[in-house]
């Protein structure tokens, strides 16, 4: 079987189960010649369980205008905001602390994000998530 020739990659962040041909999806895929509705239907089907959450997706575009896509887990910042029940992080992280998060909550988030993180175990993954929390102006409690 011949290997398909890849013409490029498209990285988008779309709310789970809510992909539609409007920007940013339509223009990004249209310029690559991909059938936008085929992508929207397939994406919405695969992301029903992430309904309403921002979902990063990497779309591989082939020379014959076909495509594959890989769905990643929602961003760590989304899980952190969900855990501490915030709308957004601090406007001045480092100066203004807007909330605090426990080590247990960090571990829960790390378990959900483990596949997408560059870490060998939950302890390392928790440190990555803790860094994200600090950069949002959220204090890490023992």
Image: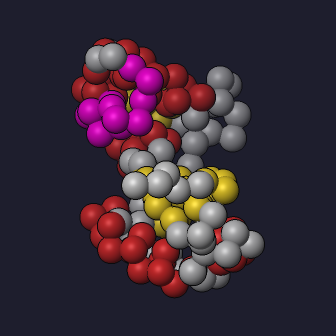
Residue 73 showing in the rendered view? yes
Residue 87 showing in the rendered view? no
| Residue at left offset 44%, top offset 24% | 118
Q: Quadrant of the N terminus?
A: bottom left
Foreground pick, 37 / 23: 37
Residue 88: x and y in percent read: 56, 49
Foreground pick, 85 / 25: 25
Question: In which image quadrant can residue 71 be found?
Answer: bottom left
Q: Is residue 33 above or below residue 61?
A: below
In the image, is 34 to the left or to the right of 139? right
Q: How is the image coloured?
A: secondary structure
Residue 35: x and y in percent read: 57, 80
Q: Quadrant of the C terminus?
A: top left
Residue 136 colored magenta?
no
Q: Main secondary structure of the magenta part?
A: helix
Foreground pick, 35 / 130: 35
Residue 68: x and y in percent read: 46, 61
Residue 51: x and y in percent read: 35, 68
| Residue at left offset 64%, top offset 81% | 22
Residue 111 colored magenta?
yes
Foreground pick, 48 / 38: 38
| Residue at left offset 69%, top offset 41% | 91
In the image, is 108 to the left or to the right of 97? left
Magenta-highlighted residues? 108-119
């Amino acid at each position: 079987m011949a290997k398909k020739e890849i013409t490029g990659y498209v990285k988008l962040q779309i709310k789970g189960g809510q992909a539609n041909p409007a920007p940013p999806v339509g223009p990004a895929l249209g310029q690559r010649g991909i059938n936008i509705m085929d992508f929207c239907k397939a994406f919405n089907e695969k992301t029903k369980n992430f309904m309403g959450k921002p979902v990063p997706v990497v779309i591989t575009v082939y020379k014959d205008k076909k495509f594959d896509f890989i769905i990643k887990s929602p961003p760590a910042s989304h899980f952190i905001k969900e855990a501490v029940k915030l709308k957004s992080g601090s406007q001045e992280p480092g100066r203004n602390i807007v909330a605090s998060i426990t080590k247990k909550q960090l571990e829960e988030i790390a378990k959900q994000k483990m596949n997408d993180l560059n870490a060998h175990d939950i302890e390392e993954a928790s440190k990555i998530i803790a860094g994200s929390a600090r950069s949002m102006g959220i204090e890490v409690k023992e």
